[in-house]
Image (cartoon, rainbow, N blue to C red):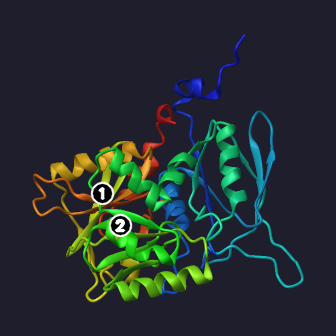
Amino acid sequence: MKTRSFKSFLNENNDEPYEILILTHSQAHVRDTDSKDTGDHILLAAKAKKEGIKVHVVDFPGLEIKKGKDGGHILTSYAFDKDGLVIMPDDKGNKEYQEPINIHPEKTLILARGLGTIGFTGNRNWYDEMKNFEMHEYTLVNDTEAFDLCTSKYFSYLKMVKENIRTPKTVPITHSSEVEECVKRLGSDFPIVLKSSTGTQTGVGVVIVESMRSLKALVQMTLLYNKHLPLIIQEFVPIDYDIRVIVCEGKILGSMKREVISGDGRSNVSLGAEASQIELTEMEKSEAIRIAEVFGTRLAGIDLLPADNREKEKPYCLEVNSNPGFRGIEKYVGGITKQFINMFKDKSIW
């Protein structure tokens, strides 16, 4: 007789309360910026508490996961300080731990907020632990398949081309000797955009390049220090602003307009860009929802470049973020985090 998966019981236990497990990497300070951002886990925990949802927060470094009872697991992890940063072992190897945390796939929703980029801001073992949770039928937002797709800008580009999603032309560069040939394949005049296909954070790792001479020098210098860093060049689409859209379970939770920084070309709020709430056109709404579905995301931050005619033309999709931050957009569009948390009270969607 075939054993029923616990998922088949979720509708029967739809009114049972759920808990959130947030896995973060609070001390992933790799950006050369003034940002002191320690992640969204503090905001998420505070908002969830107001909605009657218990939240556990653990940091990937120091995390140990053991099998518990009845298909659950027991987590031990380092404690956090008052600023929400994990307390790493001191010079003598002394460690401070949280109380053990019991989780179960039937009641625990997992948000892996700190996976980062494997080998750059994240560790392969952390990713494998998420795959392990999936094997034990936990619900992850988002799952590792969506994470894989969204964390590679070139893979994302190939997916968008296949699905007829409007996006800037993109070409990979694997060696500095290929620069001129790659620019010809791109078929775009300067300026063009040079970026890492993985590993960028809040706009750091993205450069607008004005000439072939500068591009060659940048590629040579970058690959000197990291020979196998995946680089791409991209068509530069001139805009005054871009649009971040938060989509969850096929519903738009909110959107904001981010002004391009004068003399910089980027529009990241953490780098100083001005932002405000924006009303999407029907074309932009339908395309954002379609993109989130195509990418297999349950929660996504869709970055759109507006078309000249926003009512009739599809926007460009610049990027799909499978781990979008809430703190920036909450300043301009209230209630995003609350909507997200309350959606998963309905376990039929797990």
- 10 Å crowding of disc 1: few (<14), some (14-19), many (20+): many
Instruction: Give the side of residue 243 with respect to residue 127, left or right.
Output: left
Q: Which residue is mark 1?
A: 254
Residue type (three-letter) at the residue carrying disc 2: Ile
The part of the image, by quadrant, that contains residue 254 is: bottom left
Q: Is residue 333 left or right of residue 62?
A: left
Query: Relative to 337, is 81 above or below?
Result: below
Is 276 displayed left or right of 11 in the figure? Answer: left
Q: CA distance from mark 1 to mark 2?
A: 8 Å
Q: Position of residue 178 (x, y in %)?
A: 46, 73
**Label 1 residue SS:** strand
- Which residue shows up at 55% across the image and 64% down it? 41
User: Can you say whether 43 is above or below 339 in the image?
Assistant: below
User: 10 Å neighbourhood of mark 2: few (<14), some, or many (≥20)?
Assistant: many
User: Where is 202 relative to 171, above or below?
Assistant: below
Q: Which mark is residue 173?
A: none
Of residues 73 and 296, the one nearer the viewer is 296
- Residue pictured at 48% horizontal, 83% vertical: 35
Residue marked by disc 2 = 329
- Quarter containing the N terminus: top right
Q: Which residue is at the front of the view, 350 or 230?
A: 230
